[in-house]
Amino acid sequence: MAHSPGKYADFEGLREQALALRRAGYSLRQIRDELKIYNNDILNQLVKGEPPPEWTKRPRAKDDLRARARELRLQGWTYDQIEAELGCSRSSASLWVRDLPRPERRRTPEEAASIARKGWEEKLRIRDEERQRTKEDKPYDRRENVTFVNSDPGMIKVFLAWLDLLGVERERLRFTVMIHETADIGAAERYWADLVGATLDSFNKTAVKKHNPKTVRKNTGDNYRGCLVIKVRKGAELYRRIEGSWYGIVEAARDADQPSRT
């Protein structure tokens, strides 16, 4: 904002007025409005050395959180725990306690696995309750499905071997071939049936993809057999087991990475 020449020529006179107002309990904003001083640098110079009145000292909103965060850190809490307890951001928690020693890891791998397992069991219980409520509230039956799709024979064999380890009967499996219409569909169906050791009665109708003349296909030749889809019937329980296994893997990885996260 432009000021007229000589507006601040009598600086000492303005300073005396500003200090008098300050001692009378005026805030900087009130002094500015009273003396028509709209230059912040000059306004601060006018009251330099005079402490602000108590009523203008606003406590920092995060001081209490910072003090609590440091207290928790000294008790051995991790960033994750402090963040969850105080509802603050990770960056704030880190800033407040970064000068404090890192807490020692207190859980053994077995303890961490036990905690993860209990947490997962509780999560499953809550989900089961939610599923039951959904079934009661809605006219359709929600089901989790297990479906595996791949074109690599080795991956297909690994998946089938894994199902065998889990005790999934082969009678529960249904197969579907997905393939381009220009391929030898019959040969592909026989190939996949031989690979999985099943008769064609276990196969659904083959899903055939129409040819697009504008597309240059790379999946051609005698070795092209499309993809095989394996679906496990009545797979809700298996779905939950897979979900639980993955949850355990994630928790174990997270626990292994704990030193870098604290």
Image (cartoon, grey):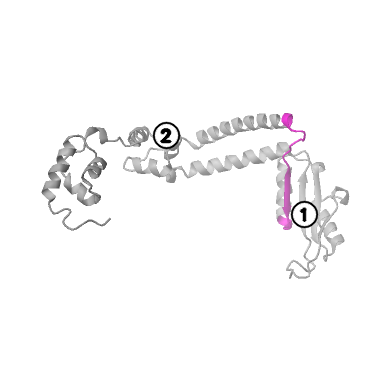
Which residue in the structure is indicated by mark 2?
Answer: 86
**Residue 123 on image: x %, y %:** 60, 33
Q: Which residues are magenta?
A: 135-154
Position of residue 37 relative to residue 78, above or below, is below
Quadrant of the rendering where the N terminus is positioned: bottom left
Which residue shows up at 11% across the image and 48% down it?
Answer: 12
Q: Counting residues from the N terminus, which is met first, the one under dot 2 or under dot 1?
A: 2
**Quarter of the figure with the C terminus:** top left
Identify the amino acid type marked 2: Leu
| Residue positioned 77% across, 51% down in the render | 229
Q: Amino acid at mark 1?
A: Leu
Residue tagged by mark 1? 228
The question of residue 170 being in magenta is answered with no
Q: Quadrant of residue 19?
A: top left
Q: CA distance from mark 2 to mark 1?
A: 50 Å
Secondary structure under the numbered disc 1 in the rendered image: strand
Residue 66: quarter of image: top left
Residue at the far right in the pictured view = 201
In the rendered image, residue 21, in percent from the top left (x then y), is placed at: 18, 38
Q: Residue at x 32, y 37 (%)?
A: 60
In the displayed structure image, the side of residue 1 where residue 211 appears, left or right: right
Q: Is residue 253 left or right of residue 92?
A: right
